Each structure stands twice: as structure tokens, then as C-alpha cells.
């Protein structure tokens, strides 16, 4: 099922990883982004800017530049999960003490 959903993704998102689309206004995502190494932030920013530029100019990326399902990397989600776990643990500790 995940592959069929991935194939039906709008063309704009074909050059992005799933984690590129996480909402940056979420405090947990903000903290996870802060913890990312600089080179991953640079790669993410490049993909986001390229997607915006393609959308503005109403062009399409060549198919060979699309992100394939096999190449999609969850580089941010594990960090977001860790940040959420830490936050919930901290909130629980603050309630108890």
C-alpha cells in the first residue's frame, strides 16, 4: 500500500523525501531539525528550494531526478520520535515531582 500511495504523490513532491514534508511549526520537529547534522540540513534545504522553484516555474523535474520509493530515507522521523519520547518523559517527571 505504501508504494501505491508513493506513486500517486503529486509531481511537486516527487523530488522530496517524506521527512522533508514534516511540519516545521511543531516544536518536536523544530528540535529534531536543530539536532540534525549540517550536511543533512543542507541537503533538505536544497530539495525544498528545488521543489518550490519547480512549482513556481511550472516545470517538471526529469524523471531520473525524482525520488524513488526505494531511495526515500527517513532521516528525520527517528529523531522526532526520540524528541517526543524525551518530552513526554520530562512532562511525566515534572508532574510527579
Image (cartoon, rainbow, N blue to C red):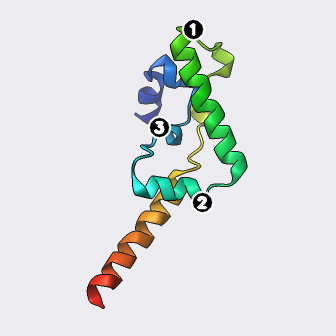
- Residue 96 lies, with reference to residue 7, above or below; the image says below
The reply to whether dot 1 and dot 3 touch (C-beta < 8 Å) is no
Which of 80/49 is in front? 49
- Specify few, some or many for label 2: CA neighbours under 10 Å numbering under 14, 14-19, or 20 or more: some
* Residue 70: percent from left, percent from top: 61, 35
Q: Residue at x 68, y 41 (%)?
A: 42
**Callout 2: SS:** helix
* Of callouts 1 and 3, the N-terminal one: 3
Q: In what quadrant of the picture does the N terminus appear? A: top left
Q: CA distance from mark 1 to mark 2?
A: 34 Å
- Specify few, some or many for label 3: CA neighbours under 10 Å numbering under 14, 14-19, or 20 or more: few
Which of 76/28 is in front? 28
On residue 14, the disc is: none
**Callout 3: SS:** helix
* Of callouts 1 and 2, the N-terminal one: 2
Instruction: Report the residue marked by disc 3.
Output: 21
Instruction: Report the residue marked by disc 2.
Output: 35
* Of callouts 2 and 3, the N-terminal one: 3
Instruction: Report the residue marked by disc 1.
Output: 59
Q: State how many labels appear.
A: 3
- Specify few, some or many for label 1: CA neighbours under 10 Å numbering under 14, 14-19, or 20 or more: few
Amino acid at each position: 500500500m505504501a508504494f501505491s500511495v508513493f506513486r500517486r504523490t503529486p509531481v511537486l513532491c516527487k523530488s522530496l523525501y517524506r521527512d522533508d514534508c514534516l511540519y516545521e511549526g511543531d516544536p518536536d520537529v523544530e528540535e529534531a531539525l536543530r539536532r540534525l547534522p549540517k550536511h543533512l540540513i543542507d541537503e533538505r534545504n536544497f530539495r525544498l528550494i528545488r521543489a518550490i522553484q519547480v512549482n513556481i516555474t511550472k516545470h517538471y523535474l526529469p524523471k531520473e531526478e525524482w525520488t524513488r520509493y526505494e531511495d526515500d530515507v527517513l532521516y528525520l522521523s527517528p529523531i522526532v520520535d526520540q524528541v517526543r519520547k524525551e518530552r513526554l518523559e520530562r512532562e511525566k517527571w515534572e508532574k510527579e515531582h
